[in-house]
Image: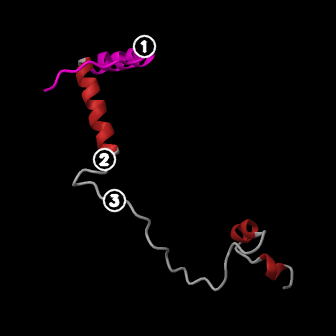
């Protein structure tokens, strides 16, 4: 293990120390667990096991027209109708 020194704001230190006491962990164990959680939820992009995120291609919805073409698209979506049909267009 590597021994290091860090600076933590007083409020954060108090909250982490309280968590450590409640869980019966050492303060160092609390910080290690926090670091592991951070790395698990935010993998580094340069690591070989991290895959680059890319946007999936759009789904083929087979729509015949743009559902957002009118200003009443919210009404159409909620009623399941076409506001142009209601207006007689």
Quadrant of the image occupied by residue 27: top left
- Name above or below for residue 36 compared with residue 2: below
For the N terminus, the quadrant is top left
> What's the residue at 28%, 24% (across, down)?
30
Count of marks placed on residues: 3
**In the image: residue 84, left or right of residue 14:** right
- Between 9 and 79, which is closer to the camera in this rendering? 9
**Sequence-wise first label, 3 or 1:** 1
> Upstream in the sequence, badge 2 or badge 1?
1
Q: Which residue is mark 2?
A: 43
Q: Height in image: 49 above or below 83?
A: above
**Mark 3 sits on what residue?**
52
The residue at 45%/73% (across/down) is: 57
C-alpha separation, residue under disc 2 versus residue under disc 1: 28 Å
**Residue at image location 75% in from the left, 67% down from the top:** 75
Callout 2: SS = loop
**Horizontal side, residue 42 vs residue 87: left or right:** left
In the rendered image, the quadrant that contains the C terminus is bottom right
Which mark is first along the chain, 2 or 3?
2
Of helix, strand and loop, which one carries label 1?
helix
Q: Quadrant of residue 76?
A: bottom right
Q: As rendered, which of 85 and 31 lies closer to the eye?
A: 31
Residue 24, visible in the rendered structure: no
Q: From this viewpoint, which residue is outermost toward the left?
A: 1
Report, in whole angstroms, how far the alpha carbon at label 3 lies from the one at label 1: 37 Å
Q: Label 1 belongs to which residue?
A: 10
Mark 3 vs mark 2, CA separation in Å: 10 Å
Q: State which region is magenta.
A: 1-25
CB within 8 Å, label 3 to label 1: no
Look at the picture and state if 57 lies above or below 48.
below
Residue drawn where x is 45% and y is 16% of the image: 11
């Amino acid at each position: 293990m590597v021994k290091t020194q860090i600076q933590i704001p007083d409020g954060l230190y108090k909250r982490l120390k309280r968590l450590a006491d409640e869980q019966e962990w050492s303060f160092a164990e609390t910080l290690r667990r926090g670091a592991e959680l951070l790395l698990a939820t935010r993998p580094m992009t340069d690591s070989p096991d991290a895959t680059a995120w890319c946007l999936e291609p759009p789904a083929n919805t087979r729509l015949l027209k743009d559902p957002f073409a009118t200003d009443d698209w919210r009404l159409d979506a909620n009623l399941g109708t076409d506001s142009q049909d209601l207006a007689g267009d």
